[in-house]
Amino acid sequence: MENAKTTMKKEESVPDQTADIIYRAATAADGGEMWKFVAAAGVLEQNPSYAYILMCQHFGDTCLVAEQGGEMVGFVLAYIPPRQDDTVFVWQVGVSKKVRGKGVGVRLLRHLMALPACRNVHYLEASVTPSNKASQNLFRGFAKRSNTQCRKMPFFPSEFFPEPHESEHLYRVGPIEWPEA
């Protein structure tokens, strides 16, 4: 039931195998590194470098970087849509092969939801292609760990795109409630 409120636990249910990873706010200066990160990953959809720089500049209050030993090992680019102030939309999330499978993606999403800019956010959304199993698993796993639902809905059909592109499905996680401090 969509209107039921659930509580996200502040305690991490994923064993912390990466205690040396620092999660911090992204800045415009991180945009170029994100672009290189995506190019090197080879599995993420690469956007122009300007898009990463601009996202970090304009939406820095909802964009994060994960670093290990001064090296970027993950990031999340997100924003609160203008007509959905209870929702944060994850535009892109990336996790390095070095730390994949160790909960970094889930931690990035948890840190995102804990940001002051997300204090009124109860839903997390992302668009995901049918072939992107890693993202599907990330958002479903995040919902499960947050004790809430993950709904999959049609979003952008492939014919919307001027170039060959898979359809995008909307994954909507929530409602999510933080316990009172």
Image (cartoon, rainbow, N blue to C red):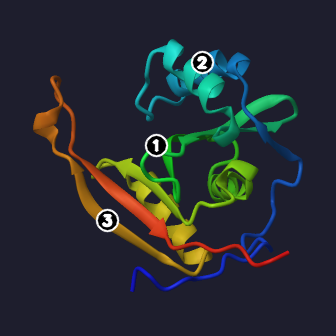
Residue assigned mark 3: 152
Q: Residue at point 41% right, 59% down? A: 136
Instruction: Give the spatial CA distance, label 1 vs label 3.
Output: 22 Å
The count of marks equals 3
Residue assigned mark 2: 53
Q: Residues within 10 Å of mark 2 (few under 14, many from 20)?
A: many
Q: Nearer the viewer, residue 101 or 152?
A: 152
Query: Which quadrant is the C terminus positioned in?
Result: bottom right
Q: Quadrant of residue 55?
A: top right
Does 138 sit left or right of 72 as displayed?
left
Does 146 sit left or right of 12 as displayed?
left
Image spot of residue 94 (x, y percent): 57, 40
Asked which secondary structure carries label 3, the reply is strand
Q: Amino acid at mark 3?
A: Lys
Q: Amino acid at mark 1?
A: Pro
Q: Quadrant of residue 166?
A: top left
Image spot of residue 144 (x, y percent): 54, 76
Asked which secondary structure carries label 2, the reply is helix
Residue assigned mark 1: 82
Q: Residue at point 55% right, 83% down? A: 5
Query: Which quadrant is the N terminus positioned in?
Result: bottom left
Q: Residue at point 40% right, 80% down? A: 2
Asked which secondary structure carries label 1, the reply is loop
